[in-house]
Image: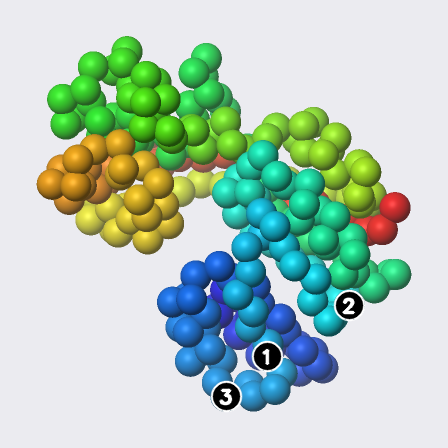
Amino acid sequence: MGQLLQEALERLPSLRLAVGLERSEHRIAEAAERLRSHGDRVALHPADLTAPEPLPYRAEVITQTSVLHWLYPDEHRVFAWAAEHLLPDGQFLLTTYHPARDAHGFGGEDDLVRDALVALGADRAEVPAVFERGGVLPIATRTRPVDGLTEALRPHLAVRGHLERDAVVTVEGPEQYEHFHAATFGDYYSRLVEPAQRPAFFRAVGESAWRRQQESGHVSHMPVRLWELTHR
């Protein structure tokens, strides 16, 4: 959050106020330190986007970047919130990604986690059951397809346009991806193994990513879509 707000404030000197919403108090503190020099051009608020509360702002632009899957199955709440907080001619710029799924709803990061669990001794065919017993829904299942998102958006916002590209993930070594996974997904997947196994789990995810990079030249690739949304 801090980096995105910093870039907006530095690139757009006419920007009067940049507001950031974040659930983690630690990340809010990090962003506040990073943005200290921008003074009252910044406002940071703790927020749970699965149940967002009203704020005293109406925005020209609202952005949300590649986090919508964490709000599943309650995405409609943030869509309604955005519609309520946009100015009449405002825009909601929403970025989503859409990994291909297999028959078990696995795709993208789920595939690397499956490899890691197998490396730690799980039977590959049993991994979907491991997810179910652990109460972990595959991220590719949490990520609605374009048609499903279009339907979820329809009661709240109009789709004015979109851009789409293929996002390719590459790494320079297993340790780099190990750190990326731990920072991005935290304990979402690692709770599938015992606490004593978690360091080995993160290493196995990094090794799986590096193996895929060596085999195909990338860790993963998937469509990413930028939606331009306005009032209905």
> What secondary structure is found at the residue carrying circle 2?
loop
Mark 2 vs mark 3: in front: 2
Q: Amino acid at mark 2?
A: Arg
Q: Residue at position x 68%, y 33% from top?
A: 149
Which residue is tagged 1?
A: 42
Which residue is tagged 2?
A: 58
Q: Residue at position x 26%, y 32% from top?
A: 192
Is residue 165 visible in this depiction of the protein?
no
The image shows residue 156, relative to residue 25, as above or below, that is: above
Q: Which quadrant holds residue 84?
A: bottom right
Q: Position of residue 111 (x, y in %)?
A: 34, 27
Left or right of residue 6, residue 132 in this image: left
Q: Amino acid at mark 3?
A: Ser
The label shown at residue 37 is 3
Packing grade of label 2 (10 A; few <14, some 14-19, many >=20) is some
Packing grade of label 1 (10 A; few <14, some 14-19, many >=20) is many
Sequence-first disc among 1 and 3: 3
